[in-house]
Image (spheres, rainbow, N blue to C red):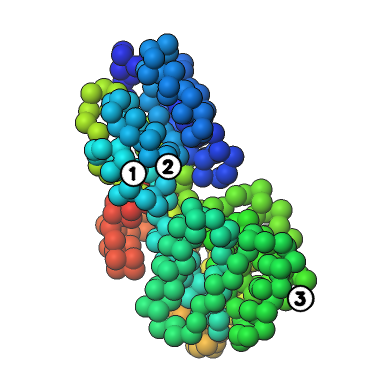
């Protein structure tokens, strides 16, 4: 993107929060600022914006472009009248914000419904859980808005999969650790195991791991725990490393910055909610699938996970395991609920999805790296197994 000449003196105001959303979002926005050599970037919050904006109106400073959490109607109204480019973060009260702002407004948020859906799909697919719990966060009104969206989508998706039981909603990070632990452990006593816990974020998931240790509940055999945000240091330093849903907050920050730049170039304010969908589940020990009892099946599962894709087929699996094909295929299906070929296709699709999301490689290159004879063969299987084309899949995981 070419840097517009008239923005060299614009102050770009970014959120100053320390949570995972703000910090990664800010890093994405700053990466655009560095690429364009934009010299004036500051961090702020709503309180500081009130003070800054009053100075701005008096004409003592240069122009502003703001990406921030703004909830105060008076400040939104002032921004609406000023014409200052503004992108809001969050989604809990868009209609109210639009009224206060007095016109079209651009909002960035994570896609909470898709997060709940991905959690339910992932946990249900394992096919081993009898009960489900949703680990909730604070009772704060803002917190409750997004965590409720995740819970409702999680429950709805489990229902679509045929689960008819209750999904208990248990508070975490709400009061004292002792009280929260008590609530959680009482909930686990009421329902059969194994239990899958979907936590609203990684910090709540870490608390669940602690509660399980207090009650001698084994993770992941008795209780599996899935978080959100993939805070890598937190997840990997947990007593049982946490599986977590990865969200591209960084890309959302870049997208928001591009919208601001378009406004500065004279583009219209757009009435748009930009949602950042989850990317995938980063699987660690807290949800890792239990190894099959049959040693030949266990060897087959391990071989499928680790073999080079360009050499991976059913006969390669059979040879690696040292059992007859008929025995292995029968036992594999009994133990895992799928055929060897299905498992190979699943492994292949996981690698294809990772390359589509984490790289800019063409489909032809990805096909070559994942053992397909042609790009068309990859595209055909991808659509059959996922219901999307490769380009649709890539686009669906971008902020939109």
Closer to the N terminus: mark 3 or mark 1?
Answer: 1
Residue 364 visible (yes or no): no
Instruction: Report helix, strand or loop for mark 1.
Output: helix
Query: Residue at (33%, 34%) from the top-left corner?
Result: 77
CB within 8 Å, label 1 to label 2: yes
Q: Position of residue 169 (x, y in %)?
A: 54, 72
From the viewer's perspective, tell me whether residue 60 is left or right of residue 374: right
Q: Nearer the viewer, mark 2 or mark 3?
A: 2
Query: Residue at (42%, 51%) from the top-left corner?
Result: 110
Using the image as rendered, state which of residue 333 and residue 324 is in the foreground: 333
Query: Which residue position is annotated with label 1?
Result: 97
Query: Which residue position is annotated with label 3?
Result: 215
Query: Residue at (37%, 18%) from the top-left corner?
Result: 57
* Mark-to-mark CA distance, 1 and 2: 7 Å
Q: Nearer the viewer, mark 3 or mark 1?
A: 1
Placement of 220 over or under 242, stated as above or below: below
């Amino acid at each position: 993107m070419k840097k517009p000449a008239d923005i060299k003196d614009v102050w770009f105001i970014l959120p100053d929060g320390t949570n995972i959303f703000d910090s990664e979002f800010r890093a994405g926005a700053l990466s655009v600022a560095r690429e364009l050599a934009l010299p004036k970037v500051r961090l702020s919050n709503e309180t500081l914006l009130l003070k800054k904006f009053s100075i701005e109106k008096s004409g003592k400073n240069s122009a502003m472009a703001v990406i921030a959490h703004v909830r105060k109607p008076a400040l939104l109204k002032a921004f609406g009248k000023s014409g200052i480019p503004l992108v809001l973060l969050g989604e809990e009260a868009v209609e109210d914000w639009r009224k206060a702002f007095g016109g079209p407004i651009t909002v960035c948020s994570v896609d909470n419904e898709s997060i709940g859906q991905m959690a339910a799909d992932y946990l249900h697919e394992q096919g081993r859980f009898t009960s489900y719990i949703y680990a909730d966060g604070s009772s704060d009104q803002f917190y409750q808005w997004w965590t409720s969206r995740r819970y409702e989508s999680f429950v709805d998706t489990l229902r679509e999969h045929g689960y008819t039981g209750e999904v208990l909603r248990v508070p975490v990070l709400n009061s004292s650790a002792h009280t929260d632990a008590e609530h959680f452990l009482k909930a686990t006593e009421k329902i059969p195991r194994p239990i899958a816990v979907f936590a609203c974020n990684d910090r709540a998931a870490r608390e669940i791991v602690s509660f399980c240790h207090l009650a001698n509940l084994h993770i992941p055999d008795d209780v599996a725990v899935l978080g959100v945000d993939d805070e890598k240091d937190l997840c990997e330093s947990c007593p049982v490393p946490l599986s977590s849903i990865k969200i591209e907050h960084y890309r959302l920050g870049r997208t928001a910055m591009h919208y601001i730049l378009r406004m500065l170039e004279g583009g219209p304010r757009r009435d748009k909610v930009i949602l950042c969908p989850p990317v995938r589940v980063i699987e660690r020990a807290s949800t890792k699938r239990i190894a099959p009892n049959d040693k030949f099946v266990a060897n087959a599962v391990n071989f499928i996970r680790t073999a080079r894709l360009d050499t991976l087929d059913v006969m390669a699996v059979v040879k690696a395991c040292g059992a007859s094909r008929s025995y292995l295929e029968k036992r594999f299906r009994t133990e895992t609920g799928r055929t060897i070929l299905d498992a190979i296709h699943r492994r292949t699709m996981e690698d294809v999805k990772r390359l589509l999301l984490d790289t800019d490689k063409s489909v032809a290159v990805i096909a070559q790296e994942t053992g397909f004879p042609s790009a068309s063969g990859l595209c055909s299987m991808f659509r059959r197994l996922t219901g999307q084309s490769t380009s649709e899949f890539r686009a669906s995981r971008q902020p939109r």
